[in-house]
Image (spheres, helix red, strand yellow):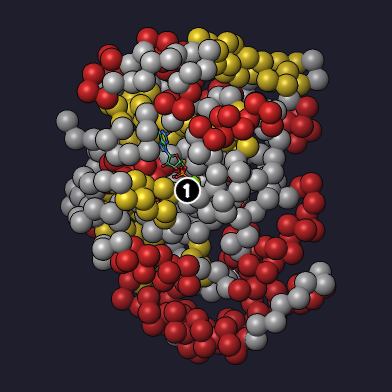
Amino acid sequence: MTKTSNVSVIIGAQWGDEGKGKITDVFAGEAAYVVRFQGGNNAGHTVIVNGKTFKLHLIPSGVIYDTPISVIGNGVVIDPKALIDEINYIRKKGIEPRLMVSDRAHVIFPYHIAMDDALTGHQGDLAAGSTKRGIAPVYADKMYRHGIRMTDLLEPDILKEKLSTAYSFNCRILKAMDFEFKETQESIFEKYLEYGQTLKSYINDVSVVLSQAVKDGKPILFEGAQGMSLDVDHGIYPHTTSSNTTAGHISAGTGVCYRNIQRVIGIAKAYVSRVGISPFPTELPENDAKALRDKGNEYGTTTGRPRRVGWLDLVQLRQAVRVNGLTEITLTKLDVLTGFKELPVCTGYKVDGRIVTEMPASLSAYRQAEPIYEILQGWNETPDLDAGYDGLPSAMKTYISYIENAVDCPISIISVGPQRHETIFKQ
Ligand code: GDP
Ligand code: IMO
Ligand code: MG
């Protein structure tokens, strides 16, 4: 049995950092293409192979293998300097990236990064605590329709025309917000023309190439960034990112028809973490959080910020199953829970005297939400990798089957460590 069917998807089921990078790497060896379809270098995906650690932000996590081509779809937003730096980072590790970048992907400019900073201050309690990579402003420019795409970097006249509009628009807002921004339009123009030339050989029509690959029966793996609760429509808005992180966005973000997708694997941590600002119903108080944070090494891959941590939230996970049409779940970081006597899991929220079992739209409901817990038994034994699923501690198996039943989705893969081989497939 192969691990992938022809077109498979890896999706974050919580607030990001679930271990998508690790699981993408586990599957990527069998893929012809590994494809990102949304987000930008706000993502941080860690892959550890043979003791070597790779921290990836824009390039898909299949890049470590020889075969697959790493594809960055049109739904991704690209900071070209960050992409060039990441290509060089991978080269330094002894790998020449096999890369394709969509001609239609939008480009992050320095004024987007400045705007991101300015916005965070302006939005106060309604901010998401952004990674300050320019993500919201670049997607906003895309929707205003004065965004600049990868293909424009190859056409000096068009780049000049578009940059003039986008630069003056952003600079006026920055000025009105009393935010200092000094880079000139001319220096940005020269720099971005050069980035275009450096990246030229990778730029292609991703939709055409991938759709042909589907026709030829080649295996394709899509790698999500961020997670369900950060989706700009279905997440805890406005404490989200600025893209659709859910599987439904794959067609729009790559130009590959949604009807081809066969397998959708949701990656869920055995507990939850959140980096940034939002209500977080199952969050542990700081005194208790530190032990779990340190044991799980919950520090941001992109910003190094300590992640907030809490107990598994089944209301959140149920939404991920529904919205993404998950065919299965991979449960990660179960090893981190070893040694806890009791494991609370949240089955619903109490809001204003009512019990809520689906993620509400109301921000006020989230702010008041009190978790309702079912207490499951913990385990002390370390999983024996050679013994497979049957060899797992019996309380761990009960924890797994409780979740499967509660969210009505099978858990097919269990991850008990950051390395490729620390992965157990349930038959
Ligand atoms: P991503 O953004 O979803 O790819 O996740 P990150 O890479 O940002 O964060 C997940 C972290 O947990 C990384 O440091 C991984 O190496 C690590 N990790 C992944 N799976 C496991 C696991 O099963 N157990 C442990 N202990 N660490 C894991
Ligand atoms: P991966 O792919 C965790 C969070 C930020 C902030 C909000 C908006 O590694 O799972 P943005 O910079 O996107 O405007 O920030 O989203 N965020 C992430 N949190 N993992 C990520 O990516 C994230 N990408 C963005 O902390 O709350
Ligand atoms: Mg991450």
Residue 211 left/right relative to 302:
left
- Residue at point 22%, 23% (across, down): 386
Expressed as whole percent of the image width and height from the top left, the position of residue 122 reads 79, 58
- Regarding residue 118, the answer to whether it shows in the image is yes
Q: Where does label 1 land, which residue?
A: 225
> On the rendered image, what quadrant is the C terminus found in?
top left
Does the closest atom of ligand 2 sit within 8 Å of the Cβ of label 1? Answer: yes
Q: Which amino acid lies under the numbered mark 1 shown in the image of this protein?
A: Ala
Q: Nearer the viewer, residue 134 or 56?
A: 56
- Residue at point 57%, 10% (across, down): 375
- Determine whether 70 is above or below 8 in the image: below
Question: Residue 338 appears in which quarter of the rendering?
Answer: top left
Residue 15 left/right relative to 5:
right
Residue 149 left/right relative to 53:
right
Expressed as whole percent of the image width and height from the top left, the position of residue 258 reads 38, 45
Question: Residue 205 appears in which quarter of the rendering?
Answer: bottom left
Count of numbered labels shown in the rendering: 1
